[in-house]
Image (spheres, rainbow, N blue to C red):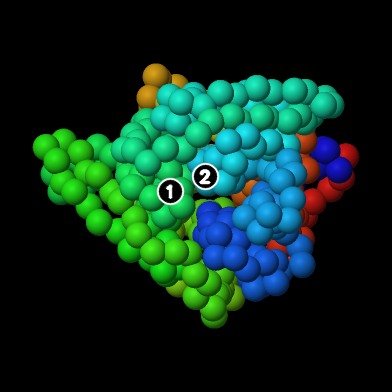
Amino acid sequence: MSELSFFSTKLNGTITLPPYKSEAIRILLMSALSGVSPTAVVRLPDRLGDDLIAAKRAAESLHALISHERNEPIYVNGSASLLRLLIPISLAYSDKCEFIISIRLWQRGLDEYVRALNCSLSFNQLSKTHGILTVTGIIKPMRYSVDVSRSSQYASGMLMMLPLVKSAALSLPYANGNIQLVSKPYFNLTLELMKRFGIQFEADHLKDSVVLSASGKYSFPGNIRLSGDGSYAANYIVANSFGSDVKFSNYPDFMQSDTVIDSIIHNDVIDISDCPDLFPILCIAACGRNGLTVIKNTARLSTKESDRVFSMQAGITSLGGSICVAENSVRIFGNGHLSCGTVNSFNDHRIVMAFAIASLIADGPIRIINADAVAKSAPSFFDDFVSLGGVIIED
């Protein structure tokens, strides 16, 4: 099922959103840190994307490491957020940790942790797609800092490590009364979930930084209910802006980073600093508008599952759209429609979903190469699309 053609003029109906991936990964890991078996206490649907399948396996391996049952390579697959959270946590328990990861994930780089943790990395390729990442280092009771210009996930990983190492602290840039980092809502999510799991924080404000320290032990809070994924919903919110009528049985009940799409979808200028995952579908929304849309702070998208700026530029251009790429922004000149044609997903799940929704404003089917990449986060996407009245043809 690597090549599929999508076609629809309007989608209608109600769907159930998959679990909010960022929340679910953190809850699984914090449950393991609480000393409980994550899969026994965190209820997940039977059908999961590849990242959450990896998170379940990784959380159980972490639980086994903490319980001294075994110290085995932790299966991460291609999940960058999972790996970035796990590295400092795992090093708090063992000075040598191994992770089974995809080659693409290794290529995305971990320089931030090499500098922040003074750890060493080695990669042994096992197959055409995967290998073992070995991380060696010692977590010390000291003040750490980490580069937060590319992703907040590094700061979240360091934050989750703090309660495990007495007297460890994390220094983050601070200005105008706020911590300064990209994708800050994801960091705030980590902070709030840790508090829910029994961790207390103290903040020491310096001239241009804030030093966070943590106390308490992870303890399972019980009664965990996962939210629906706002990133997934964003695709159908854009479909609704094209005239569809899609509803959600479990719309997110708190502000996720990507639920802002409701308020920015029609803006002429959009800053994606805090919501980078919205970029592909926002590009399609811009094509469906009449006029110029500028999307800012796009430079760091080159290290996602694909180089997303290049992926969307290639796809939109092949469908007759007008897109101009600068160093840190994209300009899209929309006229309300696209041509039919073929696009490459570059094995990126969000590119697949975005161009499937683009079929709503196309004058014929849109054929997507490597459409099965959607399994990374949304294995139900094809079923949902068809249940809402969309047409998918296997080529």
Asked if marks 2 and 1 touch (Cβ < 8 Å), the reply is yes
Distance between mark 2 and mark 1 Cα atoms: 7 Å
Q: Position of residue 201 (x, y in %)?
A: 30, 59
Residue 64 visible somewhere in the drawing:
yes
Along the viewing direction, whichever of 114 and 105 lies nearer the viewer: 114
Residue 150: mark in rendering? none
> What amino acid is labelled 1 in the image?
Val
Q: Which residue is mark 2?
A: 92
Residue at 71% of width from left, 27% of height from top? 103
Q: Position of residue 249 (x, y in %)?
A: 59, 75
Residue at 68% of width from left, 54% of height from top? 68
- Which quarter of the image is occupied by the N terminus? top right
Residue furthest top as drawn: 327
Q: Position of residue 59 (x, y in %)?
A: 65, 55
Could you say which quadrant of the image residue 314 lies in?
top right
The secondary element bearing badge 2 is classed as loop
The secondary element bearing badge 1 is classed as loop
Q: Earlier in the sequence, mark 2 or mark 1?
A: 2
> What amino acid is labelled 2 in the image?
Ala
Residue 112 visible somewhere in the drawing:
no
Residue at 76% of width from left, 29% of height from top? 131
Q: Is residue 252 left or right of residue 191?
A: right
Q: Is residue 326 left or right of residue 69?
A: left
Along the viewing direction, whichever of 162 and 55 lies nearer the viewer: 162
Residue 165: mark in rendering? 1
Indicate whether 245 appears above or below 6: below
Query: Dot 1, how many residues are within 10 Å of its Cα: few (below 14), some (14-19), or many (20+)?
Result: some
- Which quarter of the image is occupied by the C terminus? top right
Indicate whether 28 appears above or below 374: below
Query: Dot 2, how many residues are within 10 Å of its Cα: few (below 14), some (14-19), or many (20+)?
Result: some
